């Protein structure tokens, strides 16, 4: 890493600067020096710029914060690496991303946290924070050393996509996390109701003969989890909700004052189970794509703020992982390249304003990760200069050439999307600049 | 890619036969008519036509089957094709060879057609999407999704017994609809042929979600479900289903949903009873019914050969004129 004092000073001129954290939305200049934001509109007295970025017609906002990004390293480097995915993140405008604990080895000891940090710093393209495993080896039985994981830098604990063996373990795990003021990140899916299924239970799964996952797999889990959140007082976050009813339950819990948040992953705002027709393995995701009614409720939940973050739920795969009959394919979508554009598309669909979309991808997730006080997800003066400059009107086509992630598994292949990053600064360092 | 794009060519002819869903009534009728012309062949002493001479057909069975594989094999042989039977158990795929690798290896042996049976829904679609352009794929049953040749032989049987007007028929499909690829294909076929009424009859644990969206009436009471129907199509109920949370016992299932002579009297007097086999006697139906005058279960098996000959020859672009052939 280049020492902060030696980092070049950038002035980003004439862009529309949007910073929801500080209520800023104006066309102005942004000054960066020694890795930090030093001025908006006016430069500090002794300021001299080394580089100018011309941002006329561009949006200048905090670097995006992605709540769920699988990097596949350590353990699955044939799918992707920390280097490949953080590089893609920078090209997609993401400067902070959160890695779930289901790497191999699993993030259940400080050593694995340290390994990921080391590899991330070597690559140097993004900030990577980690979720520690809630139970040893994610087996759902024994607690991990939560305090040690927190000390090592984990921003929360999670059992990833795997179930806890019983509600007693769940209760104790939540209590233990609450002891150290750690947020638990929950994949709300009842293991028994999901029953190894691969599609939303409804007319489509019936027609296609696919083993189905009922909406109740999510709602039963959310109801149980909320009861234990209330019992234990733990702060909790529901990852990638998919059902209308679960959004409603979380809204109610928030109204009642429970410390719960929730997010939605971008593909669920655009796709439904109908997209599985023809056995399209690119739409095989866990939890499954649900019906139209659920999709509309997720959109409304994001607009109202019940769902306070929009994430990629990035799961890159090698091509072979999707080359099998639907059920045998690996679930997951590579989403890091399309997150910003799919978010911006909500503006054209009249769901959110530009500042709102940016809020859901910056300050919203930063708060969930507890990183907002450190300046992540904002453009506060004196804080690290994590900044993205993008052209909101530039269109691009999703294809093998435009995707930067090692995983090309996306159901949005050949879609024309709008919004393209031109520059990404990480701690005042230029980590991405679009060529040509 | 939807079903039609995958299994039809630009002229609307069969290229693969993966599912009944989306086929036109004309095409379904063509298949039945072609099968009718072949059924002469199966009843004559000369049993072969040379339509697929020089062609190689591989029966690619990833799941055990006797009846379906045998009738496909007989059908292929009666069309003068060379037939290779490959029973690929789960253990050999567990050695690490992917389905696609298996397929590529067989393709390298200059195969013209695959008949595929696989435990996973969508397997035949997957194979059809990845075979060389000249290769046809016939779905011999994929997971819970489709078993289109079984449904066609059932339609053939109904047409033989009841005549070509499906519009006046009321048909009940009884049993484990949740897991049944046969039922899904039967329902599509019956609706395409404009059947008067299609009912599905089972306890709620065996009815898939939103079943009515398939174009059926759902009955949870057996007596009501078969009252005044013209055809009862029983489904196979696998024994392992009766020990989990789906059904309490064989005994209770037979008591409530078993087809007995007494219950059969609730249907039309000339009701036809069908079953795709193999039958669990005393679970799905009584032996008296299975072997009785209303049963056409063995005729279904016989018809399977002609129907599979029709589908295979049509998919190979050799729409046979009639059973007389040149043999």
Image: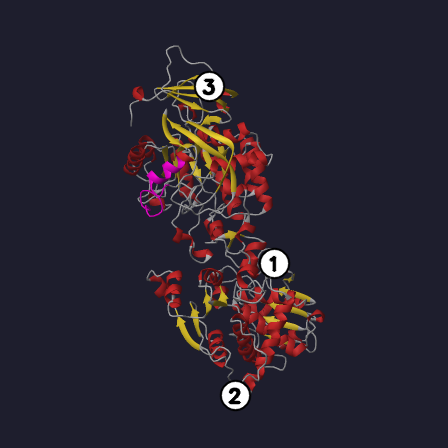
Classify 10 Å Cα crowding around label 2: few (below 14), some (14-19), many (20 and above). Answer: few
Residue B322: mark in rendering: none
Residue A422 or residue A325, whichever sits in front: A422
Is A384 rendered above or below residue B54?
above
Q: Earlier in the sequence, mark 2 or mark 1?
A: 2
* Boundaries of the magenta span: A71-89
Is A365 one of the magenta-colored residues? no
Tell me the residue that label 3 is attached to: A29
Is B318 rendered above or below residue A211?
below
User: What chain letter is assigned to the residue under label 3?
Assistant: A
Tell me the residue that label 1 is attached to: B211
Tell me the residue that label 2 is attached to: B46
Q: Give the Cα separation between the discs numbered 2 and 1.
A: 45 Å
Is B321 rendered above or below residue A274?
below
Name the secondary structure under disc 3.
strand
Does the CB distance between marks 2 and 1 fall below 8 Å? no
Quadrant occupied by the N terminus of chain A: top left
| Residue B24 at x, y percent in the picture | 63, 65
């Amino acid at each position: 890493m280049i020492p902060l004092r030696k980092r070049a000073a950038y002035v980003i001129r004439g862009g529309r600067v949007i910073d929801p954290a500080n209520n800023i939305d104006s066309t102005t200049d942004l000054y960066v020096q020694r890795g930090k934001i030093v001025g908006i509109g006016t430069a500090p007295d002794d300021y001299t710029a080394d580089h100018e970025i011309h941002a006329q017609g561009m949006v200048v906002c905090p670097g995006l914060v992605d709540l769920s990004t699988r990097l596949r390293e350590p353990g699955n480097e044939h799918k992707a690496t920390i280097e490949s995915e953080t590089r893609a993140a920078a090209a997609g405008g993401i400067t902070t991303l959160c890695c779930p604990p289901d790497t191999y080895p699993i993030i259940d000891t400080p050593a694995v946290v340290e390994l990921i940090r080391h590899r991330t710093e070597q690559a140097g393209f993004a900030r990577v924070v980690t979720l520690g495993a809630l139970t040893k080896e994610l087996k759902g039985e024994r607690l991990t050393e939560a305090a040690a994981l927190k000390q090592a830098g984990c921003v929360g604990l999670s059992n990833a996509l795997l179930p806890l063996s019983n509600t007693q373990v769940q209760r104790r795990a939540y209590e233990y996390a609450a002891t150290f003021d750690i947020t638990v990140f929950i994949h709300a899916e009842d293991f028994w109701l999901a029953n190894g299924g691969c599609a939303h239970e409804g007319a489509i799964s019936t027609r296609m003969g696919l083993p189905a996952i009922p909406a109740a797999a999510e709602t039963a889990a959310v109801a149980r989890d909320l009861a234990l959140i209330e019992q234990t007082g733990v702060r909790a976050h529901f990852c990638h909700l998919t059902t209308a009813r679960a959004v409603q339950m979380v809204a109610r819990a928030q109204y009642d004052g429970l410390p719960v948040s929730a997010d939605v992953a971008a593909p669920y705002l655009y796709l439904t189970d109908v997209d599985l027709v023809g056995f399209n393995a690119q739409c095989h995701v866990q939890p499954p794509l649900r019906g139209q009614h659920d999709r509309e409720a997720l959109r409304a939940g994001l607009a109202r703020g019940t769902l306070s973050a929009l994430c990629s739920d990035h799961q890159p795969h090698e091509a072979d992982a999707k080359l099998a009959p639907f059920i045998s394919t690996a679930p997951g979508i590579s989403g890091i390249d399309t997150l910003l554009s799919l978010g911006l598309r909500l503006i054209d669909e009249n769901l959110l304003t530009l500042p709102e979309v940016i809020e859901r991808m910056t300050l919203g997730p930063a708060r969930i990760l507890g990183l907002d006080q450190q300046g992540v997800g904002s453009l506060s003066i004196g804080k690290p200069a994590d900044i993205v400059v993008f052209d909101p009107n530039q269109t691009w086509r999703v294809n093998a050439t435009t995707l930067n992630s090692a995983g090309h598994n996306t159901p949005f292949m050949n879609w024309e999307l709008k919004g393209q990053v031109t520059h990404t600064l990480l701690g005042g360092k230029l980590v991405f600049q679009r060529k040509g | 890619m939807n079903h039609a794009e995958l299994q039809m060519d630009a002229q609307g002819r069969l290229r693969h036969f993966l599912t009944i869903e989306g086929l036109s009534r004309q095409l379904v009728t063509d298949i039945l008519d072609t099968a009718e012309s072949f059924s002469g062949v199966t009843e004559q002493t000369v049993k072969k036509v040379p339509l697929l001479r020089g062609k190689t057909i591989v029966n690619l069975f990833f799941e055990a089957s006797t009846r379906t594989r045998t009738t496909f094999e007989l059908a292929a042989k009666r069309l003068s094709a060379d037939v290779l039977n490959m029973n690929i158990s789960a253990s050999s795929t567990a050695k690490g060879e992917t389905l696609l690798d298996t397929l590529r290896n067989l393709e390298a042996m200059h195969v013209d057609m695959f008949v595929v049976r696989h435990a996973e829904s969508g397997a035949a679609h997957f194979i059809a999407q990845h075979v060389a352009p000249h290769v046809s794929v016939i779905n011999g049953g994929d997971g819970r999704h489709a078993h289109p040749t079984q449904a066609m032989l059932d339609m053939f049987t109904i047409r033989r017994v009841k005549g070509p007007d499906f519009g006046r028929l009321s048909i009940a499909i009884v049993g484990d609809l949740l897991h049944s690829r046969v039922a899904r294909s039967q329902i599509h076929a019956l609706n395409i042929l404009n059947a008067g009424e299609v009912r599905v009859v089972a306890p709620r644990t065996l009815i898939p979600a939103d079943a009515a969206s398939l174009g059926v009436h759902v009955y949870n009471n057996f007596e009501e479900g078969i009252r005044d129907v013209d055809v009862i199509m029983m489904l196979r109920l696998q024994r392992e289903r009766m020990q989990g949370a789906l059904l309490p016992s064989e005994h209770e299932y037979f008591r409530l949903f078993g087809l007995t002579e007494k219950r059969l009297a609730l249907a039309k007097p000339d009701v036809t009873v069908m079953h795709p086999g193999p039958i669990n006697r005393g679970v799905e139906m009584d032996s008296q019914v299975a072997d009785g005058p209303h049963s056409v279960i063995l005729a279904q098996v016989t018809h399977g050969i002609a129907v599979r000959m029709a589908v295979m020859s049509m998919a190979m672009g050799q729409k046979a004129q009639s059973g007389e052939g040149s043999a």
